[in-house]
Structure formats: structure tokens, C-alpha cells
Amino acid sequence: MTESDGLFDDVGTGRRTTPPVPTPSAPLAVRMRPTTLDEVVGQDHLLGERSPLRRLIAGSGGSSVMLYGPPGTGKTTMASLISQATGGSFEALSALSAGVKEVRTVIDAARRRLVNGEQTVLFIDEVHRFSKTQQDALLDAVENRIVLLVAATTENPSFSVVAPLLSRSLVLHLRSLTDADVKAVLERAVADPRGLDGVVAMTDEALDHLVAVSGGDARRALTALEASADGASDGEITVADVEAAIDRAAVRYDRSGDQHYDVTSAFIKSIRGSDVDAALHYLARMMVAGEDPRFIARRLMIHASEDIGMADPTALQTAVAAGQVVQLVGMPEARLALAQATIHLATAPKSGAVIAALGAATADVSAGKTGAVPAHLRDGHYAGAKKLGNAIGYQYPHDDPDGVLPQQYPPDELVGVDYYTPTDHGFERELGLRVGKLRSIIRGVASRTRRR
């Protein structure tokens, strides 16, 4: 969080604090924060019966934890529940404003409380923004359990938290909420006395639109709901109210229905057809509608090999890099990497030679053309291999000045069969000449080549 959400207002002072009870004027997202484990939505993979997180929240665990996950997935909620369970003191620091001095002040206060048998829970938000010096200042207090550290981060702690602090903490990865999770959060907020208390209703279409634009972020969904309720008339929130509140038009896009498949198909076919502008249009439609960015990244990676392949070998690298950005950085910043990959793939030279080559080879294998591996290529490293004729006569290519020499590699019945046929597009134009020369050397100049 870059701004206070009202949960912890008196923090980092060294004074004893506890998570305050939200006032009726507090933001809806704060008022609806779960106060018991039963109210927590999502993160089932971390809340099993004997899981470390459940034990901590139940007050029976003693491990410091790093809560790593996207915004609005419950990191601050977990910290609040752990604090309540310990029954001790609660201190909170934000890495955006606290320095080494504030960290040491809190630790000194925690050490004095520990003398009286009182545990201190220290919550640090945005811990990845702490410098190495600030993180190192926590080590002794964490290792000796002077404080029970609960740190939250939206970035992978393996890359942003110092190794000694990481090794002293339990790293728990929170996942983006599913559509069903966000829907449950919104429906509870409409009915719960802490929330809208049933004063306004909400149409199914408005609910679906709020879910779609939330991106798996419960805080974002509740903030949008509150703004929509403020502008609703006749006691009912409609799609128009939601659009007016968040300035984002509803996109007809069902992630499990026809629009999902139609837009995805149009996206890939636009890239295949080298229409970069249409590809960006469909990419924007998917992202605005709340499509899972990991799904988009996977489609780009598949397309890079299926429709570009060796015509531009760097296309796959770009697509994989975009997938890594989605994983390590998350949305909304990752949309730039997805757009960059889309532009690269759409403007790259195209070739279907990779999928055609694999299909041809697979067809022969499926047809039973799986002759014996030539004896000189078989494994010769075990006792008795030589007696079977294995590896005898194998020629080591690196012994040749050119690194390639005449030698049979496929089974007898497939000698001379070409599977890979490079196009004259992009890098494959150059590759085609090289493949031809390699085949003539490997098969011998006098060898006849058979096309499938």
C-alpha cells in the first residue's frame, strides 16, 4: 500500500498499539476486513487444518512470516488476525516511511515488554522497500523472537529480501482471489451491517462487472463498490453506476464463455496475420475485462513457436520474458511487457515450419516407423555394451574441423527423410541454406534425399 487504509494509524512510535476497530466512517474495505478466520475468503492452500498460517492465526504458532502476493489478497488481514490471536502488543511500520531509527525504537520497546512476558507482533508493509541495512536491523530481534515479524510484500521475497532474514521466516505465497472469491466478498459487503447493511441492492450485471474489473483484488473491488453505491439511485447499483464510479466501460467478455474464446482466437489470428493494431485491440479488450494475464502470456509463448518459430528465434525469448514479468511484477505494470511481446510477435516474420516438422515426425512415429537405433549411437557406458556392438564405430563430430561429418543418425527406414523445411522468411532464409549444407555432409554428397 502506498497510502494508509486506516487500519493502523498509530504505528512505529514504540508505544503499545493494537489493530483499531474501524469506525463507521472508515472506508468500506477497512470495515469489511475479516475479524475471524471463518470470514477469510480465498487462500485455501494456506489455511489447511494443520497449516503454519492457521496455527499462527489460532495463536499456537511462533514463526515469523513473509506474506507474499498481489494487492488485495489478504496480507494485512492475516497480520491483523495473527495479532489478535497472540493477545500481545502490536506494532506496524511501513517501509515507505520508516527508517532504521524507527525499527530500533520498536525493537527496544518489544524487548522491554518481553521482560514482562508480553509478545510483540511487528507488521511491516512493503518490506521489499526496506534497504539491506534496515532489513539487517531486524535479524537479531527475529532470530531471538523479541518480535514476531509479519512482513507483507507484493514482490518475490527471494529477490527483494536479504537471505538471512528470509531464512528466519516462513514464506507464504498468497494467490489472487478467484472470481468466485471476489463475488463472495462483494455480496457480503452489500448485506453485512459493517458494510452497506442491505440499504442498496445490486444487479447481477453490476456484480459481474465489479468482479471483472477487480483483477482478483478484494480491496479494489470493495472500493469500487463503495463508490458505486454512493452514486446509485432508486436503491440499486447498476452497471451504469459502476461505470460512472470507476470510469471504465463494461466490456462484453465472459472468461468462461464465447467471448473468451472468440476474443482469444481473434488475438492470436491477428498476430499470425501480422496486424499489430488489431492484436493490440484484442489484447486491450482482454486486459480491461480482467482476463488472467498468465493466460495471455501462455498464449503468446505458444504462438511464438507455433507461428514464428525459427523465422525469428528471439520471439520466444520475448514471450517467455513477458511471462516472467507477469509472475515477478504482476499487474498493472506487467501489461506493458504483454504489449511489447504482442508487438514483437505481430511484426515478426512468420513460419509454421516448427509445428509442421513436429507434426510430420509425430505422424511417422504414430504410424509405427520406429526402427532400431543404429548400433553406433547406442549407449556404450555400461558393462557388456561393447559385446552387444553398442557405440562401436561412433564418430565424434568435434574431432572434425568443421564440427560435422558423415554419419547415420536415424533408423534405417527413415534415412533421407526431411521433416523440417525452412521457409524463406526472416532468419529461416539463412537457416535454410545451412540446413541444406548440413544434410549433404551428414548423409554424404551421393546420398539421395526423400521427401515425405
Image: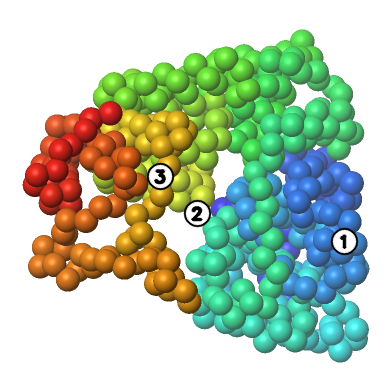
The residue identified by callout 2 is 328
Disc 2 or disc 3, which is closer to the eye? 3
The spot of residue 88 in percent (x, y) is 87, 72
Element marked by disc 2: helix
Amino acid type of disc 2? Leu
SS state under label 3 = loop
Per the model, the C-alpha gap separating discs 2 and 3 is: 46 Å
Q: Which mark is residue 244?
A: none
Q: CA distance from mark 1 to mark 2?
A: 29 Å
Which dot marks residue 50? 1
Helix or strand or loop: what does disc 1 sit on? loop
Q: Amino acid at mark 3?
A: Gly
Q: Residue at x 27, y 65 (%)?
A: 394
Amino acid type, label 1: Arg
Q: Is label 1 in contact with label 3 (beta carbons under 8 Å)?
A: no
Q: CA distance from mark 1 to mark 3?
A: 53 Å
- Whether residues under marks 2 and 3 lie with C-beta atoms below 8 angstroms apart, the answer is no
Q: Please give left or right for residue 299 compared with residue 439 in the image.
A: right
Q: Nearer the viewer, residue 424 or 448?
A: 448
Q: Identify which residue is drawn at 48% across, 46% down.
A: 326
Indicate the position of residue 265 as horizontal and vertical percent values: 45, 20
The residue labelled by disc 3 is: 371
**Location of residue 412 (image quadrant):** top left
